[in-house]
Image (cartoon, rainbow, N blue to C red):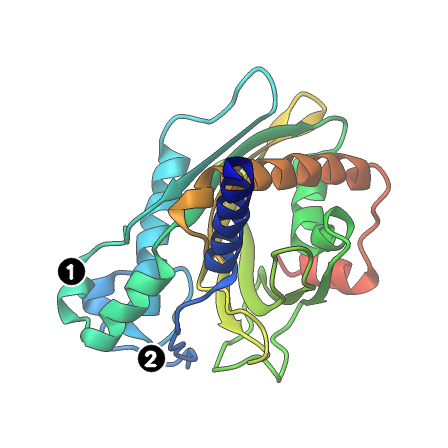
Amino acid sequence: MKRLIVAVLLIAGIGIGIWLAVREDPYAEVQPTGGAAEHLDVTGEPIFVFGDLYLDGRSAWARCLFDEDLEGPSLKSETDSVEVSVREAPFTGGLWLERLDEAGRARREAAETRVVESRLCFRVPDVPPERVALLLVAGRIGETADPGTTMEWYGSIPGELPGDMQDAPGRYVYRRKTQPTGLRKPTDAWYVGFLERRKGCWVLREELWANGSEDTTPVRFDVGQYVISAEGAGSLVENRTLYRGQGFPALIQGMAISRTKSFWKGWIKTVGQLALTWQPSETVRTWAAML
C-alpha cells in the first residue's frame, strides 16, 4: 500500500509539473508602430525603433549589452562551446523604467521572468566570414535544425509586417513558426534584423518584432547578436541570445537549460553542414549587393 501511495504521489507531482510547464499567464502584447518616439531621450538608441516605451527601452538595453560584447574580451575558446543560463527576474534597465506605467511594468515582469540566455562560440572551417554571415541571415537554418519550424525570409519589408518599418541596407525580416512537439506549444513570430561589417568582422543582430497568429503562444522576449570573424581559412562565430517563449517553472529549470544546450549543439552542427553546400538565392545575392 505504501508503495502505491508513493507511486500515486509521484505521478501527481509529475502531472502538476507538466501543468505548470505548459500553463501561461495572460500577456497583454503591444503591437509596435515603428514610428517616431519622443521617449528616446530616456531609452537611448534601440536596435530597432518600436514606438513603445518598454519595447524601445529593452531594445536600447540590448544594444548596450551587445556593444559591450564587441568591446570586451572574446568568447573564443580552444573548442566549440555552449553556455546556457537563466535570468530568473526582470533585468533590463535605464532611465526609462521610471516612466513605465503599471501596464508596462506588468509586461516587463511577464516578458523578463526566466529568460534563457545562451552564449555560443564555434568554428566553421574553410568557409569565409561573409559566406557564413549570409547563411545565418537567410539560410533558414531553423528549418533544418528543427523539423517543426518553418521560416519565410524577406530582403525587403513585407506589407503584412505589423507597424511601420522602413527598408534600409542590411535590414531584413523573417517570420518563424514552430509546431507543437511534446510540451512545446506552437509559436508564430516576426523578426527584424540587420547585418553590417564592423571592426574587421560581420555583426548580425536580430530582434523579436511582433507575434503573428493569436492562436499561438506568444514569444515575449527574443534578441540576439552574432559576430563572425576570420580564423585561418574559415570563420569563428560568437553569439549571445536571450529568449523567453513558453514559460516554465523553477521546478524544471534544469531541464530547460539541458534542452536548450542540446538544441544549440544540434544547430551548430547544422550550420557546419549547410555552410559547405548552401548557395544564396538570387534574391539574397541582390540583397547582399546593397550592403
Give the side of residue 135 with respect to residue 77, left or right: right
Near mark 2 (Cα within 10 A), the count class, few <14, some 14-19 or many ≥20, is few
Question: Label 1, on which residue?
Answer: 95
Q: Secondary structure at mark 1?
A: helix
At x 47% / y 55%, what residue is drawn?
16
Extreme top residue here? Answer: 78
Q: Eyeballing the image, is 277 above or below 181?
A: above
Q: Are marks 2 and 1 in contact (CB under 8 Å)?
A: no
Residue 118 appears in the figure: yes
Give the side of residue 99 with respect to residue 10, left or right: left
Near mark 1 (Cα within 10 A), the count class, few <14, some 14-19 or many ≥20, is few
Q: Eyeballing the image, is 204 above or below 23?
A: above
Residue 204 appears in the figure: no
First reached walking from the N terminus: tag 2 or tag 1: 2
Question: How many marks do you count on the picture?
Answer: 2
Q: Quadrant of residue 264?
A: top right
Where in the figure is residue 137, as x and y percent of width and height? 65, 53
At x 49% / y 69%, what residue is drawn?
209
Where in the figure is residue 93, as x and y percent of width and height? 23, 54
Give the side of residue 205 with respect to residue 115, left or right: right
Question: Label 2, on which residue?
Answer: 36
Q: Eyeballing the image, is 89 above or below 245?
A: above
Q: Quadrant of residue 108?
A: bottom left
